[in-house]
Image (tube, rainbow, N blue to C red):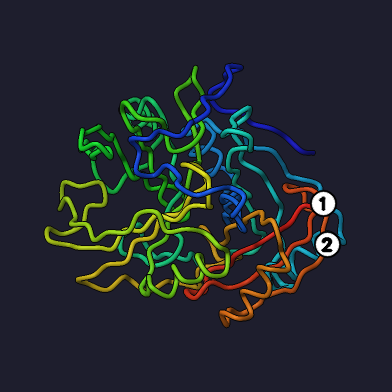
Amino acid sequence: MAWIITGITSLARAETPRFDPLDSLSPKTSRADALALPLQTVTLSTVSLEQVRLFYVEGMGMTLTGPVVVPRDVKKQQRALWEIPDTIGWQEYHLTRHGATISDRPAMSVRVLVLDTPTPTIHASWNARSLGGFSMGFPNRQQPALDARIRKLGFGALNALEIYDVPRTDGSPYTIHETIFNAPDFVHAVGIDRVGMLPLGAVDSETGLGGPGYSAQVVADSDNVLAFYTEVLGLELRRDAVWQSAGEDGAMALPNGTAFRFSIVFAKGYGPGGHLLFVDYTNGEGIENNAPPRVPNRGIGMWSFPVTDLAAVARRAAAFGARIVHKTVRIDDPLHGAVRAMTVLAPNGFLVELYEVVP
């Protein structure tokens, strides 16, 4: 029997972020030029549905639906697209934020694969240097309260709540409240409040909770990884700088003096919400994966993007030299509907699903 568990309930309409001319993350390009649209789904593999429910529903206030009924032929297609061995079975669940939208599109969702066979975790720990899918970001308007609630549920964080200032485009500062929580399966969940600025994704105006609004990875070859997302998917690099760690008191709890390239990638013409963050350490190596950074290994193992022209993406992927995991196939996806979909590996071995809605 399928069931639905909802976190903190609200019937209020979610906040809809608008473009802010003082926000350096606001677009300067046109949606008409977008090939890949904003990230729509993060796929998470686990063997503990209870821990997922506790963190994302009780903690983050999301809604968990499932197990989703997936017809046998569709599941066979999923297995081929995601290259999951025949020896591993799963049940599919969905984490959503009811009623949350960003402009004219739905907020990001999380596809949860509850495995019947334990697989290795992609990360061996919550260390911020661990390569691969690092986090999902949860914009909100009550970070101190969220921080307290997550810790009360028994989940830790990389560090204490961090408060710091970031400049607007006119030089005036705004304040960020941020905690990087230790979510199940060595995944990080970033609670973040941009005080006085529009949130990084849809936030419920009554509960003050939102997200996921974005997802992040730690990579070792950012030039090649960023080239994949910009050249194959047609995304744009909108922020790119080398940052110095805030040290042992910072949200990432990195040693003093740690430097890293911090890059943010967006769909052309779109503002915050469904964007990607990449961290590449410039004065020290990342920690190698415990297992390949893709499903069905436990943790964040796939990103799914809607695209405007799947054939064009396929041609770009071939020209780039990316490994095509599965060529285009029509599938009635339980989350995305009737689509044409394909899968490809990013240069760091991360699985990327691309789909185009069937007219």
How packed is label 2: few (under 14 Cα within 10 Å), some, or many (20 or more)?
Answer: some
Contact (Cβ within 8 Å) of mark 2 with mark 1:
yes
In percent of width and height, residue 324 lies at 66, 77
Measuring 77% from the left and 52% from the top, which residue is drawn there? 357
Left or right: where does residue 50 sit relative to residue 227?
A: right
Q: Is residue 264 above or below residue 288?
A: above
In percent of width and height, residue 310 lies at 71, 64
In percent of width and height, residue 61 lies at 52, 30
Q: Nearer the viewer, residue 79 or 266?
A: 266
Classify residue 97 by image quadrant. Answer: top right
In space, the residues marked 2 and 1 are separated at their CA atoms by 7 Å
Q: Nearer the viewer, residue 220 or 4?
A: 220
Measuring 43% from the left and 38% from the top, which residue is drawn there? 200
Q: Considering only order in the chain, which callout, 1 or 2, is on the residue closer to the N terminus?
A: 2
Measuring 56% from the left and 27% from the top, which residue is drawn there? 7
Q: Is residue 65 above or below residue 227?
A: above
In percent of width and height, residue 43 lies at 59, 55
How packed is label 1: few (under 14 Cα within 10 Å), some, or many (20 or more)?
Answer: some
Residue 123's disc is none
Q: Is residue 211 above or below residue 29?
A: above
Q: Tell me the kind of residue under disc 1.
A: Ala
Q: Secondary structure at mark 2?
A: strand
Q: Secondary structure at mark 1?
A: strand
Q: Nearer the viewer, residue 336 or 291?
A: 336
Residue 330's disc is 2
Q: Tell me the kind of residue under disc 2.
A: Arg
Image quarter in which the N terminus is found: top right
Residue 338's disc is 1
